[in-house]
Amino acid sequence: MIASRWQSGFSLLEVTISIVVIGLLAGASLGVWRPASERLDELRAESFLKVVQQAVIRFAQTSYRLPCPDTTGNGYENCGAGKTGRVPYYTLGMELGGNVVNVGNSYENLLYGVYRAANADLAQLIDRAGDDLGAGSSLDINDFRQALMTAATANTVAAEVHVTGDGSTTGAENCAANRVANLAFVLISAGARDRDGDNDGFDGLNANWSANGGGSLCASSPLLRQSANYDDIVAAVSFQSLLGTVTQTR
């Protein structure tokens, strides 16, 4: 009986059950693979953001100022009046695989903002320590430190780059009613996916920033958790943190 059953083949019901089981297994494996793929892109975005952040800090340590944003998309800083824009990769000495204008097609999609108040423009190296022009100590790290200390004691204002709350530990996410702090500089990564589906890459409040310097100065909190509609990564470097870093390099 057993031999004759094997010889007669499988019934239609058995074949149908087998197909359903195979389909379920394939669907389950696909569900595991997709999040793993997204997580890899997230790790790439986080890593690239850290590399750019360190490049900006190194620039400050050697140039005694922060770089101006790239508002034209050519990879170089534009030190007009702009406070936000693209990352000036070539000014930072970074080589990219593709054209700077097109890096937004991947995890390299970043925006950059710098504090540029009139009395403490961190993107401008001028004498602030009262040294005699032409002296060896004129236009050096002390002038940058002075600008950072001045900015650190100023009131938080809407006219300079700042972050708002996260809806939890730092209060409501509201650019008008809850400006948590102005920052020395801000980097925003669009993350691995366009979670809010607006074809911009950047999610939530960060979508209001502009690559040409004409958009918002308010970024989401670095503490804002990822969700179904948000996966941006915000690096906000305070005046005090940057002051400590440049002081240690002296």
Image (spheres, rainbow, N blue to C red):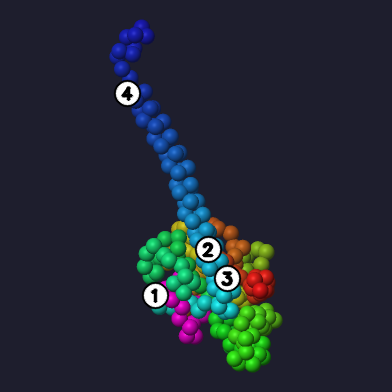
Q: Is residue 80 magenta?
A: yes
- Residue 171 image offset from top left, x and y in percent: 66, 68
Q: Residue at (52%, 77%) from the top-left corner?
A: 67
Most frequent secondary structure within the magenta stretch:
loop
Packing grade of label 3 (10 A; few <14, some 14-19, many >=20) is many
Residue nearer the viewer, 147 or 45: 147
Q: Earlier in the sequence, mark 1 or mark 2?
A: 2
Tag 4 or tag 2, which sits nearer the N-term?
4
Residue designated by label 4: 12
Residue 230 in view of the camera: no
Q: Tell me the element at label 1.
A: loop
Q: Which residue is label 3 attached to?
A: 57
The amino acid sitting under disc 4 is Leu
73 or 38, nearer to the observer: 73
**Residue wearing tag 1:** 74
**Residue that carries the numbered disc 2 in the rendered image:** 51
Quick one: which residue is furthest to the right in this view? 153
**Residue at the extreme top:** 1
Give the distance between the C-alpha atoms of the residues marked 2 and 4, in whole angstroms. 59 Å
Q: Hey, what amino acid is under mark 3? A: Ile
Membership of 143 in magenta stretch: no
> Nearer the viewer's eye, disc 3 or disc 1?
3
**Rendering coords of residue 72 (x, y %):** 40, 78
Could you say where residue 158 lies in the image, as x and y percent from the top left?
59, 81
Q: Is residue 95 left or right of residue 49?
A: left
Q: Which residues are magenta?
A: 75-89
